[in-house]
């Protein structure tokens, strides 16, 4: 569910010169809600919101519901207040994923294999190699829209441009159920119509920072030179990205098989939780799940990130890169709990029964992934003793057991009487 800003003036004819416009951005319109209406036609014309329960958030809303101010990630309880007569439905991930696989496998792949899928309902497509058969990127876009509608009864919007940035902005402004071509010669004019948040990657913090320097639109952004942008953002990379984006330039290529970047697990509590036992127990289970996934995929991770969502729906994350890549929950858990304490302003060895702030959602993820078979991991002394089959005292198994018990005792000790907090 896209919440990117749209400008009415942008949804117009920008010209018909398709030369160099070989990048398509295809985005389903209100995907989850549209699929529910497709299989329940009696809901057509009604505000449909995907997300039920007091603790749920809105996963999607159709355009009728958006007229009431409903957006994704909004608490479902708030959506009920804004639209008490709306139709609220549970999320059916299995159904949505099934349709997504059919759209990408049976429709999009018939045009080209140069597809970068960025979510269940959104992708970039490089059609340069398909033009010999299809002749025109606009013809391809029209065929894709027609097929999606015919097979699944839903609509999609298509942006056609010379690069990923402009194609995505074009599809956003073509919504709903539209297609927008931005010729190469017009892409700077098109981009500079937009507010700052129209550029993907500009969030509230960066928008506020730019606003402090009088930059309130992409056109104003285009007036800044690189040194000034670097001074404002504090990053040469960010400054170059913004400098190019303000001119409609983007050198990113279509990535058809992107390596996995992170693996994580999180959970929303039925009620806001302030006791350490519940939060630490949940994070322990998340570490177990993530470690199991790492081992199943033959990966190890270098960076641990903890995510917390509070009752006011604000979210905070904190990361730490560890010395040794790992796929073990026993290595991930201490780092996760260390990050938890730091995020809540607790002392490193604090072990209170109550946390200083209630938590709505908690989770952890790992990144910096690499294949275990190709990763050099410095063995510890225990590893070397284990490989030798002896601990130096003739009792390998007993030594390992003692080592495991000592590790658990250390964790229990750091959390005092709250050893049950960790479920150990």
Image (tube, helix red, strand yellow):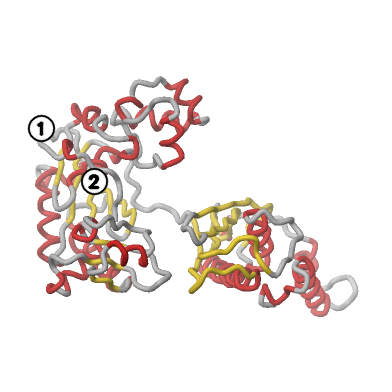
Instruction: Indicate the secondary structure of the residue bearing disc 1.
Output: loop
Counting residues from the start of the chain, the first of labels 2 and 1 encountered is: 1
Q: Residue at x 68, y 52 (%)?
A: 323
353 relative position to 38: left or right: right
Q: Is residue 132 above or below residue 83?
A: above
170 relative position to 318: left or right: left
Mark 2 and mark 1: span between their CA atoms? 18 Å
Q: Residue at x 37, y 59 (%)?
A: 74
Q: Position of residue 398 (x, y in %)?
A: 82, 79
Q: Position of residue 338 (x, y in %)?
A: 68, 58
Q: Which residue is mark 1?
A: 15
Q: Residue at x 12, y 72 (%)?
A: 41
**Residue 102 appears in view:** no
Q: Is residue 187 above or below residue 60?
A: above
Q: Identify the image quadrant of residue 259.
A: bottom left
Q: Nearer the viewer, residue 202 or 332?
A: 202
Furthest-right residue in this view? 393
Q: Residue at x 13, y 33 (%)?
A: 14
Q: Position of residue 172 (x, y in %)?
A: 23, 46
Q: Which mark is residue 284?
A: none
Q: Residues within 10 Å of mark 2 (few under 14, many from 20)?
A: many
Q: Quadrant of the N terminus?
A: bottom left
Q: Nearer the viewer, residue 44 or 1?
A: 44
Q: Which mark is residue 172?
A: 2
Q: Quadrant of the C terminus?
A: bottom right
Q: Are the residues at dot 2 and dot 1 in contact (C-beta closer than 8 Å)?
A: no
């Amino acid at each position: 569910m896209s919440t990117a800003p749209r400008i009415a003036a942008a949804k117009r004819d920008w010209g018909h010169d398709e030369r160099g416009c070989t990048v398509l951005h295809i985005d389903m319109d209100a995907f989850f809600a549209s699929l529910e209406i497709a299989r329940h036609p009696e809901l057509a014309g009604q505000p449909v919101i995907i997300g039920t329960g007091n603790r749920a958030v809105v996963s999607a809303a159709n355009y009728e519901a958006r007229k009431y101010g409903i957006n994704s990630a909004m608490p479902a309880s708030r959506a009920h207040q804004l639209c008490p007569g709306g139709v609220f439905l549970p999320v059916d991930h299995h159904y949505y994923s099934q349709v997504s696989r059919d759209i990408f496998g049976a429709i999009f792949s018939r045009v080209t294999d140069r597809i970068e899928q960025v979510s269940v309902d959104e992708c970039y497509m490089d059609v340069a190699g398909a033009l010999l058969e299809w002749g025109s990127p606009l013809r391809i876009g029209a065929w894709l829209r027609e097929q999606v509608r015919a097979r699944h009864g839903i609509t999609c919007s298509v942006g056609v441009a010379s690069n990923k940035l402009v194609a995505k902005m074009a599809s956003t402004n073509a919504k709903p159920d539209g297609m927008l071509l931005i010729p190469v010669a017009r892409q700077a004019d098109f981009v500079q119509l937009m507010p700052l948040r129209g550029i993907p990657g500009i969030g509230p913090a960066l928008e506020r920072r730019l606003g402090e320097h009088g930059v309130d639109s992409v056109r104003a952004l285009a007036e800044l030179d690189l040194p000034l942008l670097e001074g404002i953002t504090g990053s040469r990379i960010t400054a170059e990205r913004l400098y190019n984006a303000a001119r409609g330039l983007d050198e990113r290529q279509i990535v058809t098989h992107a390596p996995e970047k992170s693996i994580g697990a999180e959970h929303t509590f039925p009620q806001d939780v302030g006791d350490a036992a519940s939060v630490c127990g949940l994070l322990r289970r998340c570490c177990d799940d993530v470690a199991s996934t790492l081992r199943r995929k033959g990966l190890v991770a270098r960076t641990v990130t903890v995510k917390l969502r509070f009752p006011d729906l604000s979210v905070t994350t904190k990361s730490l890169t560890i010395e040794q890549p790992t796929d073990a929950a026993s290595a991930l858990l201490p780092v996760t709990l260390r990050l938890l304490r730091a995020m809540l302003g607790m002392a490193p060895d604090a072990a209170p029964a109550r946390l200083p702030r209630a938590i709505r959602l908690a989770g952890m993820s790992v990144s910096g992934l690499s294949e275990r078979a190709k990763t050099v991991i410095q063995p510890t002394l225990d590893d070397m003793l284990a490989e030798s089959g002896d601990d130096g005292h003739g009792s390998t198994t007993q030594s390992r057991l003692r080592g495991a018990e000592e590790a658990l005792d250390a964790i229990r000790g750091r959390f005092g009487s709250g050893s049950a907090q960790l479920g150990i």
